Image (spheres, rainbow, N blue to C red):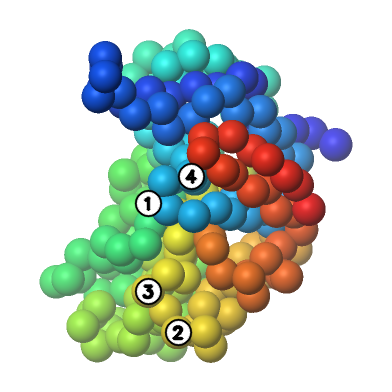
Amino acid sequence: MECMVRAQEVTRTFGSGSGAVHALKGTDLAVPSGKLVALKGRSGSGKTTLINLLGALDRPTGGKVFYRDQELSALSDKERSRLRSREMGLIFQSFALLPLMSAFENVEFGLRIAGVPRAHYRDYTERALEAVGMKARMKHRPFELSGGEQQRVAIARAIAHRPSLILADEPTAELDSRMGLQVMKVFRDLVQDFGMTVILTTHDPAIMEIVDKVYALEDGRIVEEA
């Protein structure tokens, strides 16, 4: 099976000298394509740092990060940005929707950033909103939507350009358990129906029952797999 992303002896240090923070301390990770994977660990364990490295948002202090067989840390900032916008979808705890735009416009705006041809805007946007169950609410602005609905719009924006990899940092942290499970069902369907690979960070035990694989981080290292 193809390996979607891989971290090889990755370290990440912030600061220097006595004030240095060693967020990752030699992490190895290999995530196969078409899987729903969770990174679990308490605050400060290195989950977000690892997600940022896998998503080409940051560079490791040491070691290597690969997307498929391409070494991310060897790419220029421009090349990493291009790869990220075309091949990846990023979802964060804060929904980061533009408040004056409708759900449709928020998703469409993501397509513009990804460089998708204008002729595909409407079709791709409507398909993405339909995939997350939000097509009927696509004319509503964020303040007219519940937290779960806003998160589903954020997911639609992340998947509209049809990326191979979705990276989500604590995507259900601001949602109640019912809404959280709805969002997880969307991720499950993306993997099953579209063959996407989804990697998310979480500390919710209920979510860990839904995913294909769980990696536990502790003090900057992966300590167990399930």
Query: Residue 99 at x, y = what percent?
Result: 17, 71
Number of marks in the rendered image: 4
Residue beneath disc 1: 111
Q: Amino acid at mark 4?
A: Ser
Is disc 4 surrounded by few (<14), some (14 to 19) or many (20+) residues within 10 Å? some
Name the element at disc 3.
loop
Residue at left offset 56%, top offset 81%: 182
Q: Amino acid at mark 2?
A: Asp
**Alpha carbons under labels 3 and 2: distance apart:** 7 Å
Q: Amino acid at mark 1?
A: Leu
**Alpha carbons under labels 4 and 1: distance apart:** 33 Å
Q: Furthest-left residue in view?
A: 100
Name the element at disc 4.
loop
Residue at left offset 64%, top offset 38%: 222
Residue beneath disc 4: 45
- Cβ atoms at labels 2 and 1 below 8 Å apart: no
Q: Is residue 157 above or below residue 197?
A: below
Query: Residue 81 at x, y = what percent?
Result: 37, 29
* 99 vs 207, nearest the viewer: 207
Residue beneath disc 2: 176
Among the two numbered marks 1 and 3 on one chain, the one whose residue lies closer to the N terminus: 1
Query: Residue 152 at x, y = what percent?
Result: 45, 73
Q: Comparing marks 2 and 1, which lies closer to the viewer?
A: 2
Is disc 2 surrounded by few (<14), some (14 to 19) or many (20+) residues within 10 Å? few
* 72 vs 37, nearest the viewer: 37
* 221 vs 163, nearest the viewer: 221
Quadrant holding the N terminus: top right
Residue beneath disc 3: 174
